[in-house]
Image (tube, helix red, strand yellow):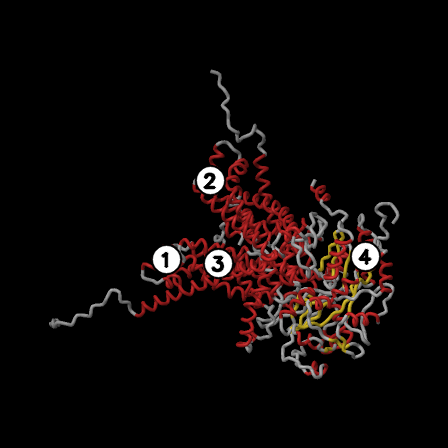
Amino acid sequence: MTALDTSPTTPAPRRSLREIDARTRRRQLASTAMRVVLTAVMAVAVLPLLLILYVVIERGWSVISLQFFTEDTLPFRMEGGGFRQGFVGSFLIMLLAIPMAIIPGVATAVYLVEYGKGKKLAALVRFVTDVMTGVPSIFVGLFVYAAVVIGTIRLGFGTLAAAIAIAIVMLPIVVRSSEEMLKLVPDHLRSAALGLGARRWQTTVKVVLPAAAPGLATGSMLAVARGAGETAPLILTALGSFTTTWYLVGERQASLPQLIHQNAVQPFPPGIERAWGGALCLVAITLLFTVAARLVAARFGKRREGM
Amino acid sequence: MLVAVLAGCAPGDDRIEGAGATFPTPLFQDWIHTYAQTVDQDLTVDYQSIGSGGGITQFLGQTIDWGTSERYLRDSDLAEAEQLRGCPAFQVPITFGAVVIAFADPALDGLVLDAEVISGIYRRTITNYSDERIAALNPGRDLPDREIIPVHRSDGSGTTSVFTTWLADEDPEWAAELGAGTEVNWPAGTIGGPGNEGVTANIAQNPGGLGYVNQSYAQVLDLPQAAIVNADGNPVYPTPEATAAGIAQVDIPDDFQFDILGVGGDGYPIAGAVWNFYWECGYRGDTGQQLREFWRWAVRNGDQAAVELGYIPLSPQLKERVLAALDRIGAQDPTPTGGAS
Amino acid sequence: MTPTTAPVHRPLRGPGRGRWTDPLFKALVTTSGVFVLFLLAFMIIRTTADAWPIFQKEGLGFFTGTEWEAGQQRDLPNIHGTYGAWPFIYGTLVTSAIALLIALPVSIAVALYITQLAHRRLRGWLTYAVETLAAVPSIVYGLWGLLFFLPVVLRPVMVKLADWFGGFFLFEGPVFGLSYFSAGVVLAIMILPIMTAIIREVFAVAPTAELHAAYGLGATQAEVIRKVLLPRSYSGIVGGAMLGLGRAIGETVAVAMLVGGSQRMGYSLFFAGDTMAAHIFNTFQDALPETVLGLMAIGVALFVFTFAINVLARLLVWRVGRNTRDAAV
């Protein structure tokens, strides 16, 4: 029989519960280091946005005046003048493009949500629309140039051709966002309408669409923000103009992004100043639409909770 | 109904549209501005500087009222035009300008270069300002030890055409390797800018920048320029007088198709003309008359603006010939108001 | 009591107006849906048909040839020029690669910060801030890049890099300013929002139960992220990266203003080259009809690349990023 060792042993020294062994400390340091790095990167990532806004405002501000909105562009090397033809042009182009994008866009979204559940055709349409958001806008411009400006329809450079190009760029965005908004409308609204004896189209038009209206507006505003800032398709379809024109067909049309570009790549300083001013206006317009869209979306979300 | 709306939205009679070369853009803009302020406030004249090739294409495509280019229409182009429209098209020179070699560095103003050296610079066989071949042309001049950054046009260009035509004429190596044209295959190591505007901007942005631009741009921006060795071996700085002297050496035929080559004596050798193209028929409403009036005014009264902006106006004899030719604009159209034409 | 007709407030059903209204409506919206398909098909067919003479003449040489020389004659359908687009394809690949290399780590980091580290109230604001980058139009990026970012920030960096690493072929000088590098860096800023949005969504839908389980076992935050969150998000991250790549490949105006415009290609990052989209944009206005066909051929090639990448990307992340906010991203 082995005897147990019963001699008193020195007790192990008491360790504080707060003591951390080396390995754990290393792990914790690694984690803290990661947090620091991530925070730093986050700060760096926000920097370009602040820099862009600051520089655009600082350099563009001096040009903004009533004259900037009410006068056409002067020769590049002269001071003064404005971008009126760009504002008018962009306004007209968007005026035409918005219905051309929103009507088919919402209609397609209605198809996808109300009539297309589980159907293969609808799945294909949805997939294609998703992919179309990534089509380069210059390609859309080339297509509209080939088919509309010089092609079968032969409209020539002008507002309408440009509007068609912008509408094609906006269309997938409208479809995607409208689809999501329509899906958010709760089914019990539809059931209630059907239960009251409405036909399907009446349910859609008089119940679902109004209920989703704020959301549809949000998506449309985001599409407008995107469409207003597009430059590439405009060069290929509207070409540009130094004077204001209200015509839809037959005359070249200016637009704000194209004017900015034209003034930016030339060397005379007054023109470059005007380019910054134009950029400031363009950023203001797109930000306005984007922020407005977010506000509407936020309010729509709150309202929905009461439904 | 849509057709009616669209038809109603088609342009009316108070606008004439042109497009083409970037070379004369500052001058045309000035003329248009002055004309609108002093002569005819109701007429809108619009000119888009899309490049000489675009000017020819759109003119032949009949989407503009007049075209402008640094490359004159060849006989084949004129024949094609006549076939398209049913009546002849014609061209007149409107203004002349020099193509200068501009630098970014003010200390290089007046640097002497010749066709072979310029060819070498753009072909990247000469890459530094202190190269001995440049020094040979500039005895006694302090040359910086700096990399040359040659700038060219990234778009098709009549200015390129003038420049490369002269280079090909003077330097057989250039003619063999790159040739002349509105667009050439520029060697690696050069950068491109769109339009005279883009080239000027690029030159200014690089300390070693060197590029070919319209004299007007160089003058307004006060860019340092090179003195070019002409056919007689004289280095000539591009002043308006030197360019005019060079142009005066050229025999201008009746059809106005000419190249400015082989300039010697006191003349600055790299010069080009800008041609306007018009039709003899097919203008709607008052357009023909408005075109005639505007361009006759420009040829008669535009000299001061031209000189101010660094272009070379037409000589008095040439002016008379051009004014006579301008009467052909829309000559085959019926007069719009049925009165005396 | 005589029965009175109970007033019905705006009856939803009209007086038997038609059994055809419902099918008509359905036909209308279905046509609209099919119209989208038809539009895409028409776009592809029309441009390819127009550009076909170029493809026919060059064959595969269109993609591998390095000489791009526009024909000077005007007698279509004869093609006189040489149209080898490899320098532009190469330029597109290089600038997009630079953009992706810079933007992907930053996107992941930002997405991690927003979902894992940020205070809950801060999350919305940070997300908005990143998305506002997406709202800035491309032309403004080009202008800002050309006239501010390039001279003030990029050029000194490029000069330093050329000084230190000039021997290495990627950083060989001279430094022009306009270059693949400049275009790539600005592209990175431009594709950051879309990639961050997707990756953020992917992280946000990771089941918190798994993360909490890991914390419960004593993992540090870095370990949770590294061993739990990231592994399950790989496909989403790849999908987001591909979407960003697709956007970078198709970006036109900003790149056109920053990349340089030479028709050649070079191996240095500081070479002033050209990309497919930028070349179309810069040379379109002046192009002779034959050259326009060449540009259209480039456009078709560009479309095929972006289409392929977007299809792959959407297959990976098709469920993600379908909020309204992201629709425009």
State whether discs 3 and 4 lie on one chain: no
Let me know if residue A64 appears in the view: yes
Q: Which mark is residue C211?
A: 1
Q: Tell me the residue that label 4 is attached to.
A: B297
Q: Is residue C226 above or below residue C326?
A: below
In whole angstroms, how far apart are the C-alphas of marks 3 and 4?
A: 60 Å
Q: Mark 2 touching mark 4, by CB under 8 A?
A: no
Classify residue C290 as left or right of residue B300.
left
Secondary structure at numbered mark 2 = helix
The three-letter amino acid code for the residue at tag 3 is Thr
Neighbour class for label 4 at 10 Å: few (<14), some, many (≥20)? some
The three-letter amino acid code for the residue at tag 2 is Asp
Secondary structure at numbered mark 3 = helix
Q: Which of the two labelled residues, at mark 3 and mark 1, occupies the earlier sequence position? A: 3
Q: Tag 1, which chain?
A: C
> Where residue B23 appears, x then y in whole percent?
73, 64
> Where residue A176 appears, x then y in whole percent?
53, 49
- The quadrant the N terminus of chain A occupies is bottom left
Q: Tag 4, which chain?
A: B
- Closer to the eye: label 3 or 2: 3
Neighbour class for label 2 at 10 Å: few (<14), some, many (≥20)? few
Is A203 in front, or is B138? B138
Q: Which mark is residue C196?
A: 3
State whether discs 3 and 2 lie on one chain: no
In whole angstroms, how far apart are the C-alphas of marks 3 and 1?
A: 21 Å
Q: Which mark is residue A187?
A: 2
- Closer to the eye: label 1 or 4: 4
In whole angstroms, how far apart are the C-alphas of marks 3 and 2?
A: 32 Å
> Where residue B245 appears, x then y in whole percent?
82, 72
In whole angstroms, how far apart are the C-alphas of marks 2 and 4?
A: 72 Å
